Amino acid sequence: MLTRTRIALLCAAAALAVSLPTLRNGFAIDDIYVFVDQPAAHSLRNIPQFFAGGWGMGTTNTQERALNTRYYRPVPTTLGALEYTLFGLRPAGYHLASALLHAATATLVALLLWQLTGGAIATTFLGGVLFAIHPVQSEAFCAACYQTTLLAGFFGTLALVAFGLVLVRGPRLGTLVGLGASLLLALVSKEESFAIPFFVLAWVALLRPEGWRRALWPSAIAMAIPLVLVLLLRHAFLVPSKVTYFADEPARVVVLTMVRVAGFYLELLVAPLQFCPFYDWFIIGYETGISLAVVTGAVVLCLAIGAALFFVRRSPLISLGVAWILLGLAPVSQAIPIIVVAADRFLYIPMLGWVLLVGLLLERGLARARAAGWIKLPAVAIALLFVAYAVRTVTRVPDWRNDETLNRASAEAFPETPIPFLNLATYYERMEKNPAKALEALAEADRRAPGWRPARERAARLKMQIAP
């Protein structure tokens, strides 16, 4: 018999099974400037200063400092200092921490699904395992620098579980403190966790669970305190970055492009085949009119909103799952401009809504199949789907071995973009000290985007450096 505890342990085991292979990987993408080029993060004595400035402000890379002036993430920096104390600059230790964080979050997701569904075994098990193994989760635990996402997911889910306890036990001081502390730690881990209080409000508004009247106001106060505190800290220590994805593009372009991204996210959730660490301007360009991609995204959004409204009375849990997906993506919707238009890791917190929705639908489908007397076929189909997801997740891990493997995988998956070859040129020049290989990469970038200025200028500079 699958109990709540056994399901939670199975979800943790599934998460470890797909994430522990990262221990063979090195540092990649932003790991260098977050862990290597940030001397301040190499000592636990500097923890107080992590809370008095923006994320990554101790890095020696001036470009990265300019990109990250809008982020307040002292908890991940503190974890990085602890990891450096324990492991030095051995990547395996950082990847182990990421795998354990992902497994711990998968455990909490199972507990949360159990709370939401009143102990529905199939929904809890299927949803929890899906969270653990879904291929889109791989980015969060493959790059050590994305422990920001893992910490926000862990503490954000812990806050939701704490609210579930408030509903059951009543507004006890210890549980409310746990709710507020969990939310505080999530908010100072990554900005996507600002969606968590809205998750709670949607939970109350759509499900009207028993005990919600006595739990709502104490819980609202417990969440409001860390929210106000973090907003004050952000105001005191952060400044807006001048570097954004859309630069000075008009609002119409921003809206049309982000509508297109809605369809892209659905593709990642349903058929996660191709991944990229940075969906650049060649992959997701500016949408200036009504294209097929924009229409597809608009249809996806309309169907999502329509489903949320349609099931409010018929099946509130389905409405809640859809609402959580939409609310979870709100912080990265460019309402506040950021440098990234879309990312696999942006789905880590919205995945809570997706696994609730998928778990419910699969459980109902299995129940109908059982009643009709043909349970084996759908059960096998679900098992094969989950195995395929797990295999895709594991096969993504070697791509993150280092910057070279990651950019070559991106270049192969997205032949329309030259940016992976620009990144490869940087890797060959700085890490391998091989300007000849860097020039080869820049030539390939120019072949993909003839006349592209960044590649041409970099190549000219390198040729001057190596000229006799």
Image (cartoon, rainbow, N blue to C red):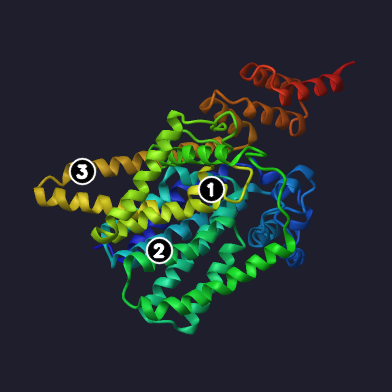
Q: Is residue 25 left or right of residue 451?
A: left
Q: Residue at x 59, y 37 (%)?
A: 278
Tag shown at residue 333: 1
Query: Which element carries disc 1, helix, strand or loop?
Result: loop
Q: Position of residue 238 (x, y in %)?
A: 72, 58
Q: Residue at x 55, y 45 (%)?
A: 142
Mark positioned earlier in the residue sequence (1 or 3): 1
Mark positioned earlier in the residue sequence (2 or 1): 2
Q: Position of residue 132 (x, y in %)?
A: 42, 51
Depth check: 312 or 147 in front? 312
Depth check: 368 or 395 in front? 368
Q: Is residue 309 visible?
A: yes
Q: Position of residue 272 (x, y in %)?
A: 42, 38
Q: Is residue 198 left or right of residue 411?
A: left
The residue singled out by tag 3 in the image is 378
* Front: mark 1 or 3: 1
Give neighbour class at mark 1: few <14, some 14-19, many 20+ (Cα, 10 Å). many
Amino acid type indicated by mark 2 = Ala
Give neighbour class at mark 2: few <14, some 14-19, many 20+ (Cα, 10 Å). some
Tag shown at residue 424: none
Alpha carbon separation for disc pair 1 and 3: 36 Å
Amino acid type indicated by mark 3 = Pro
